[in-house]
Image (cartoon, rainbow, N blue to C red):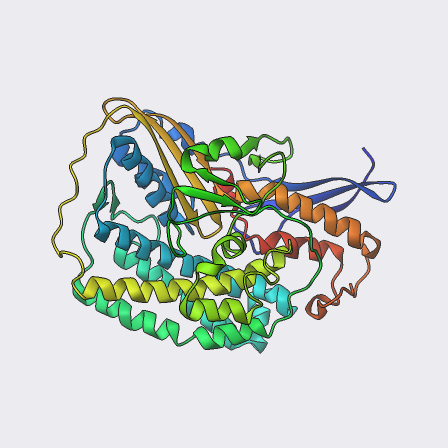
């Protein structure tokens, strides 16, 4: 078996329980495991035999961070199977809900989970002693994201207001006006956010050709589409996703892993910026250009730039939320609107959206009464796991001689000086914003 010389039993500052194990033979890396210790939760089995209208409330429990994405994705799949068209108002409200989720999730990860890595602190609490403004900004933006989800979805997590074909109730004008004011306050943070992130040197520890996958909306930047783009120039329909995302079982993990054309691939904010960053407008485009532009560092295979991509998307989500709210208050849509009639029928439906961490896939088969016969969920973290392991292997091969030595000196990464290789391995894994609970759904 060779010597096991690196074992990180508890990967900290991530959602869920995972670790990292690196096996070496004769000084060479033999294998790398991104260990997922958290047990399987069997949501796909749980929903079988249940009626369609119970689907979203159940599968939104897969995650407490991206529960809105799971709820919306499930309803899209139901609507796809039953041939239901949603109204422009429902489409806009769902987008507003997803923007709130993106703000909440990115703010948590960027400011409280990975910023301590870039600034050289062991935790957000330690970082806050010297960079209190960054911690406060992260908490304020997370609170704003939660408020948007609560107003639109009926609750900050596991939104009960997201129904097949529409929403249970429309947010009141006063609630929307309150959100306008809160989002305006959030947008005042944009210049500070951009300058803060622009002033942090991103360690150039890895530059490796990487395949990126993301949804490509018919126009503009966004989180909902039925078309998938890959950085090799290929595009695919939603129906082709399961065939290009080859899931496999590995013995060291309770989560499946995925390959694209027999290669690891990456999804998430960095992939979206690589594939659709040229579609960004407004202050989000200014932020992207400030960080080097779409053709700059984002597509060079360094996962540590995912944080900057999340910063760009925070700006995008704030601007989009403000625009959506204004359209709702300007009377662009009827205040009273009936949900479409729902007539169950047998068939298969697919939901595909961009959750904060990347492409989220839900597929369900229904019988003629709308009972769920089969289910398949593929989460972003499960798609990223093979790529994470590849990067951990490359990092170990490149910096293995530094094992056990403090003061790891790497080009352009002064914030990480004073740490050793196991710490750097954790930094790489954290940069992907892994959600382990989602991965073992």
Find residue 124 and report its horizontal and vertical position in percent. Answer: 56, 66
Image: 133 above or below 4: below
Left or right for 397, reference 83 = right
Residue closest to the eye, 281 or 12: 281
Find residue 283 and report its horizontal and vertical position in percent. Answer: 43, 71
Image: 54 above or below 215: above
Residue lying furthest front in this view? 233
Residue occupying image coordinates x 27% and y 32%: 52
Find residue 329 and report its horizontal and vertical position in percent. Answer: 19, 65
Left or right for 283, reference 154 = right
Q: Quadrant of residue 411?
A: bottom right
Q: Quadrant of residue 406?
A: bottom right
Q: Quadrant of the N terminus?
A: top right
Residue occupying image coordinates x 51% and y 47%: 435
Find residue 45 and report its horizontal and vertical position in percent. Answer: 41, 27
Whether residue 416 can be seen here: yes
Question: How many numbered marks have been drawn onto this rendered protein structure?
Answer: 0
Residue closest to the eye, 204 or 357: 204
Residue occupying image coordinates x 52% and y 63%: 110
Residue lying furthest right in this view? 26
Left or right for 348, reference 404 = left
Image: 361 above or below 174: above
Whether residue 8 can be seen here: no
Residue occupying image coordinates x 33% and y 69%: 183
Residue closest to the eye, 169 or 139: 169
């Amino acid at each position: 078996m060779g010597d096991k010389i690196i074992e990180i039993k508890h990967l900290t500052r991530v959602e869920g329980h995972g670790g990292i194990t690196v096996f070496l033979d004769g000084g060479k890396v033999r294998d790398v495991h991104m260990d997922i210790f958290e047990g399987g939760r069997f949501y796909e089995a749980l929903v079988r035999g249940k009626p369609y209208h119970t689907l979203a409330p159940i599968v939104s429990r897969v995650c407490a961070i991206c529960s809105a994405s799971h709820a919306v994705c499930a309803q899209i799949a139901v609507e796809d199977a039953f041939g239901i068209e949603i109204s422009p108002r429902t489409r806009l409200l769902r987008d507003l809900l997803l923007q709130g989720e993106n703000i909440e999730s990115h703010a948590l990860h960027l400011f409280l989970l990975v910023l301590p890595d870039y600034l050289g602190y062991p935790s957000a609490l330690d970082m806050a002693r010297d960079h209190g403004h960054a911690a406060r900004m992260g908490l304020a933006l997370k609170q704003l994201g939660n408020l948007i989800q609560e107003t639109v979805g009926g609750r900050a997590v596991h939104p009960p207001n997201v129904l097949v074909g529409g929403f249970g109730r429309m947010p009141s004008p006063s609630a929307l006006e309150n959100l306008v004011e809160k989002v305006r306050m959030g947008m005042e943070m944009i210049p500070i956010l951009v300058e803060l992130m622009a002033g942090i040197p991103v360690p150039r520890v890895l530059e490796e050709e990487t395949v990126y996958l993301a949804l490509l909306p018919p126009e503009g930047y966004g989180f909902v589409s039925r078309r998938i783009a890959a950085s090799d120039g290929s595009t695919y329909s939603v129906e082709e996703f399961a065939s290009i995302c080859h899931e496999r079982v590995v013995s060291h993990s309770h989560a499946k892993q995925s390959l694209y054309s027999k290669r690891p691939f990456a999804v998430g904010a960095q992939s979206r910026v690589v594939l659709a960053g040229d579609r960004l407008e407004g202050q989000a485009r200014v932020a992207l250009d400030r960080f080097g532009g779409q053709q700059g560092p984002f597509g060079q295979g360094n996962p540590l730039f995912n944080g900057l991509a999340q910063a760009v998307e925070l700006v995008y989500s704030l601007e989009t939320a403000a625009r959506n709210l204004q359209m709702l208050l300007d009377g662009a849509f009827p205040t009273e609107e009936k949900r479409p009639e729902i007539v169950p029928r047998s068939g298969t439906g697919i939901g595909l959206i961009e959750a904060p961490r990347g492409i989220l896939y839900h597929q369900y088969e229904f019988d003629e009464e709308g009972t769920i016969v089969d289910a398949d969920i593929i989460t972003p973290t499960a798609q990223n796991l093979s790529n994470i392991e590849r990067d951990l292997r490359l990092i170990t091969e490149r910096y293995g001689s530094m094992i056990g030595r403090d003061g790891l000196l790497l080009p352009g990464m002064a914030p990480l000086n004073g740490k050793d290789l196991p710490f750097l391995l954790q930094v790489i894994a954290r940069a992907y914003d892994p959600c382990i609970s989602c991965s073992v759904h």
